[in-house]
Image (cartoon, rainbow, N blue to C red):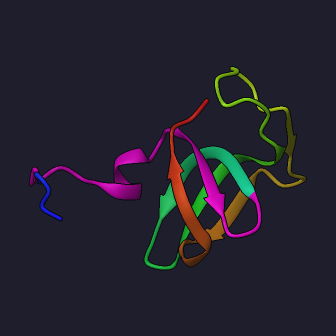
Amino acid sequence: MKRIVEVSKDESGFMSLIGEKVTLFCCRYFYTGTLVGVNDTCIELSDAKIIYETGDFDKKEWSNCQSLPNSTLFIQTGAIESYGIMK
């Protein structure tokens, strides 16, 4: 498959989302929080929450999203299937 690719010197991937509220679709659970750290093996979320039920994706809030007992969560990048800014 041929694709149009734009090459930029700006950061991409996780680095481009530092400081943003992101949603991570992982192999077992979904998480949301502010992306505050990135390294070779994991990312760091502050104000992290686990999403147990998404509800309709066109709604402003998740149907069942609960704060975790600690404010910081580290997630292995190998467990992340997709990610982005959602809600």
Q: Residue at x 58, y 67 (%)?
A: 80
Determine which quarter of the picture holds residue 21. Answer: top right
At a point 49% along the width and 38% down the height, the residue shown is: 20
Looking at the picture, tell me which residue is in the foreground, 55 or 32: 55
**Residue at (51% x, 79% y) in the render:** 41
Q: Which residues are magenta?
A: 6-29
Assign the N terminus to one quadrant of the image: bottom left
Residue lying at the far front in this picture: please name it: 1
Is 9 within the magenta? Answer: yes
From what the image shows, is residue 32 above or below residue 27?
above
Q: Is residue 77 magenta?
A: no
* Quadrant assignment for the C terminus: top right
Question: Which residue does the image show at 28% across and 54% down from the upper left?
Answer: 12
x, y percentage for residue 32? 68, 45
Say which of 73 and 52 sits in front.
Answer: 52
Q: How many marks do you count on the picture? A: 0
Q: Is residue 71 above or below residue 29?
A: above
Place of residue 82 in the rendered image (x, y in percent of width and height, measured from the top left): 52, 58
Q: Is residue 81 left or right of residue 63?
A: left
Where is residue 74? Give x, y as percent. Answer: 66, 66
Q: Nearest the camera: 26 or 45?
A: 26
Q: Quadrant of residue 76?
A: bottom right
